[in-house]
Image (cartoon, helix red, strand yellow):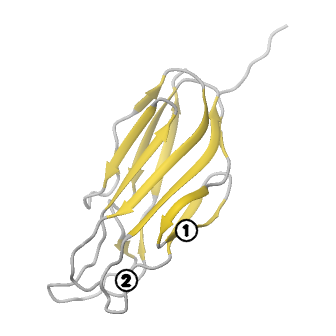
Amino acid sequence: MQGNAQPVCHFEAARQVRSTNMAVSGGSATQNILSVTQLIDPNARAVATSISVTLKGMCNHPHAMTVSSGNGGLDPLTKTEAGSGFVQRFDYGASVAWGPSVVALQTGGVQGQSTPEAIAPGAVSGDLRIDIEVSDPGDAPVVAGIYTDNLVITFRPLL
């Protein structure tokens, strides 16, 4: 007899551990949506924004993990004309801890910005922890709009 166990990585929905003006607002088997619940104060100044979430999961094989940012930070969906002295993008730091590996990404406006690969030499099971903190852009007012980015965590089998 012979059988084959395919390489699998599986994670449950994100659970919020702590948060300041952010929340887990939805998700599926392949993605979780984190939303900023309050980005500015009544004077259009940025407020502190951060979140920590965990996802229970497992990868039954050696693998490499990377973290990347689609926009290189939170960018507005629609650019608005604004004079100097306004904020129109937010950088953020994201730290991802999984098994023996921790990777950190600090956005800087580069689309597709990615961390180096972190290698897990064997199967891993437990909590994947994600910590995100939006950088303080200073005291300038923020241009109105919807600010978005896609933070992607990729697991590549090493078989």
Question: Of 132 and 159, which appears nearest the observer?
Answer: 132
Q: Is residue 73 left or right of residue 120?
A: left
* Whether residue 78 is situated above or below residue 30 in the rendered picture: below
**On the image, numbered disc 1 is attached to which residue?**
23
Kind of residue at badge 1 = Ala
Kind of residue at badge 2 = Ile
Cα distance between the residues tagged 2 and 1: 15 Å
Q: Which element type, helix, strand or loop, lies under badge 1?
A: strand
Which dot marks residue 40?
2
Q: Residue at x 44, y 33 (%)?
A: 101
Q: Residue at x 54, y 23 (%)?
A: 62
Residue lying farthest to the top in this orientation: 1
Residue 78 lies in what quarter of the image? Answer: bottom left
* Whether residue 52 is situated above or below residue 58 in the rendered picture: below
Which x, y percent locates residue 81? Answer: 24, 89
Earlier sequence position, callout 2 versus callout 1: 1
Q: Which element type, helix, strand or loop, lies under badge 2?
A: loop
Confirm or deny contact between disc 2 and disc 1 (CB under 8 A). Answer: no
Question: Of 20 and 22, which appears nearest the observer?
Answer: 20
Residue lying farthest to the left in this orientation: 84
